[in-house]
Image (cartoon, rainbow, N blue to C red):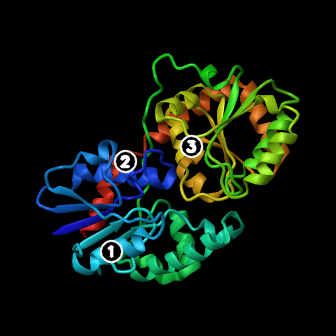
Amino acid sequence: MVIGIEASHANQAERTGVEEYCYQIIESLKKVIPSAEKVILYSNSPLIEDLATLPPNWEVKILHWPFSKLWTQARLSWHFLFHKPDIFFSPGQILPMNCPRKTVTMVHDSAFMVYPRAYGFFSRLYLRWMNRRIMNKSETIITSTEFNKSELQRLYGGRIAQKVAVIPLGFNTVRPTANFDPKKFGATKPYILSVGRLETKKNTKFLIQAFCVMKMSADIQLVLVGRPGVGYGPIERQIKQCPYIEDIIRLDYISRADLAGLYKNAVALVFPSIYEGFGFPLLEALSLGTPAIAGDIEALREVCGDACTYVDPFDVKLLSDTIIELVKNSGNQIKFSHEGRERAAQYSWDKAGAETWNVIAS
């Protein structure tokens, strides 16, 4: 049996959520797919990092494409006209125009349907079309939470449930670099941390508003790790209007080890997102003993259980008061640190890889 896996999303040096999932799930599948099966990774460029180290029964097909868009729909689809694998797994929520009958697709979330204003016009059109194709063409759909499954049923009809498998994700267990010092990033005071794109869906503007209110009661900094996303204009204006702008630290992409150091030394991770399918940063923070404050939405409660503090993501004063209470109450910090580590221990990429292989092979 020949199993094909789309690897172009995973093959990125600077990975965000979906790309990180693609990378980690391929690495996990290397450990569990039997040597009797042939596996082909499809990429638009040579593989990097550990991705390039392949088991004997694995190989890579580099399908060159001169453009920045449409590699999957055009180049990979053309290749499949003549060389289809028996099974195709797409971890990046995207399908070629021409794909094998037995196709398994990962759907990360349906945010573009629920909060269309958080996406550009053409992105919305493309994602709507692509997800409809995924629903129709995939033999099996994998998603990471029961919440995501219920969203797919609500949006595409109850029959979809018959082909959806829920497999919780893992998280990165990278440890901080030795002698990590947050001062290298300008964090010279106690700080709260935000990890994720600076965009409407992540509710970054409301976090900054809450920080400006909170600063009147606590001498603390806000560290934002993430690149600008859709809706960054109002966020940037909010930062400039904040009277405590000197205590807002903006960072772009940083190494995993440095990010672990920032998690480890933060007073709390604050993640007031208005829509998520899973929530990688929460588990990463919890695994390092860092308390987390999250938006009170269904997917995050499903993933983190009682290990997080949840707040209405649109109540600026409540968010500010919750942060201040956590900052000032060392007992709560210790409590949530312990519960967070226990919760995070329930998730692993090895487990996600084994369950994913069971679905692919069934």
Q: Which badge, 3 or 1, comes first in the chain's sequence?
A: 1
Going by the numbered disc 2, the residue's amino acid type is Trp
In the displayed structure, 253 sits above or below 234; it is above
Q: What SS does tag 3 mark?
A: helix
Foreground pick, 62 / 37: 62
Residue linked to disc 1: 103
Q: CA distance from mark 2 to mark 3?
A: 15 Å
Q: Label 3: few (<14), some or many (≥20) within 10 Å?
A: many
Report whether 131 appears left or right of 276. left
Foreground pick, 40 / 290: 40
**Residues at circles 2 and 1 in contact by the CB criterion of under 8 Å:** no
| Residue 200 visible in rendering | yes
Q: Residue at x 38, y 59 (%)?
A: 8
**Residues at circles 2 and 3 in contact by the CB criterion of under 8 Å:** no
Residue linked to disc 2: 349
Q: Residue at x 41, y 78 (%)?
A: 162
Q: Nearer the viewer, mark 3 or mark 1?
A: 1
